[in-house]
Amino acid sequence: MESENVPLVRRRSGGGTVYHDIGNTNYTIIMPRENFDRVTNAELIVRGLHQLDIPASVNERHDIVVDGKKVSGSAYKLVNNRAYHHGTMLIDADLGALGRYLRPPVKNLVGKGVDSVRSTVGKLRDHSYTVDHSTFSDAVAEEFCRTHRVSLIKPIELTMKHLTEHPKIQEYLDEIKTWDWIYGQTPDFTHRLEKIFSWAKVDIIIRSHRGLITESSVSVGAADWTALALRLAERLIGKHYSKDGVAEAFRFEDRDTLTDRHGDQVRELERWLVESL
């Protein structure tokens, strides 16, 4: 994701990771808490799709599917006396990119988080040549008005200027860009990294809590690395579990005093460890 400039954003509701591009539309339904019902909301969206002659249905996990393939997942949040239920709709999304970003290379990670349930996905364009963001939005809006017996109001197009003029929204935008918000609630996990270099075998174990490295061990199969390995393990503790955090651990004051051989090995080790995160 980073190499392809795909940003990572954490939302306030729960649920698994989703992929967004211009071919995906997000919808949100806001309601009093006592009226919240995931199935009712999903069925409303499905009835909107039926208006577009798309044979959608709701499965046992409350996902919206067409011909058994998931085209929409959703999440919700309950706050005081309010609730909101929002979801994605894969209209003409790049499913190749979706699979690439949501199925990253397997790492030696052992975590305490709950794994997402993987599903076969599809998109609405496979069932309609005319469906797009506008037709989907219009169909769902019409079904909402019909279901709740209300009149359609003129949509408001939100722009960055509109958002930045409202301090509370700007405050929210600023918060979701911070490291603490994106990574600070990460479930505990252990990451083991192993590599055989030309000069030694390296085995590193990192334990992380809320995005910070709390424990680490560095084992290098070379007798002249004992003190340096211990020093690196100590310096990793307290750093962010990130490329920048690991790079910071390698910036110790007397690094320039290392022998040429050790200096080259440290640079090689740093490059590998940073690229492995």
Image (cartoon, grey):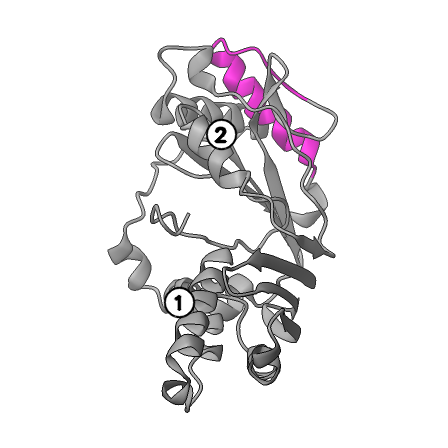
Q: What residue is drawn where x is 54% and y is 43%?
A: 105
Q: Residue 61 lies in what quarter of the image?
A: top right
Q: Residue 238 lies in what quarter of the image?
A: bottom right
Where disc 1 sits, the SS reads helix
Q: Residue 24 lies in what quarter of the image?
A: top left
Q: Nearer the viewer, residue 81 or 25?
A: 25
User: Disc 2 designates what residue?
Assistant: 89
In the displayed structure, 31 sits above or below 235; it is above
In percent of width and height, residue 173 lies at 40, 62
Where disc 2 sits, the SS reads strand
Q: What residue is drawn where x is 52% and y is 21%?
A: 122
Callout 2–callout 1 Cβ contact below 8 Å: no
In percent of width and height, residue 113 lies at 71, 54
Q: Amino acid at mark 1?
A: Asp
Q: What residue is drawn where x is 61% and y is 44%?
A: 16
In percent of width and height, residue 59 lies at 70, 23
The circle drawn on residue 131 is none
- Magenta stretch bounds: 37-58
User: Disc 1 designates what residue?
Assistant: 174
In the displayed structure, 199 sits above or below 69; it is below
Quick one: label 2 or label 1, which is nearer the N terminus?
2
In the displayed structure, 265 sits above or below 112; it is below
- The reply to whether residue 229 is visible in this rendering is no
In percent of width and height, residue 176 lies at 46, 62
Q: Is residue 263 left or right of residue 209?
A: left
Q: Amino acid at mark 2?
A: Met
Q: Nearer the viewer, residue 247 or 169?
A: 247
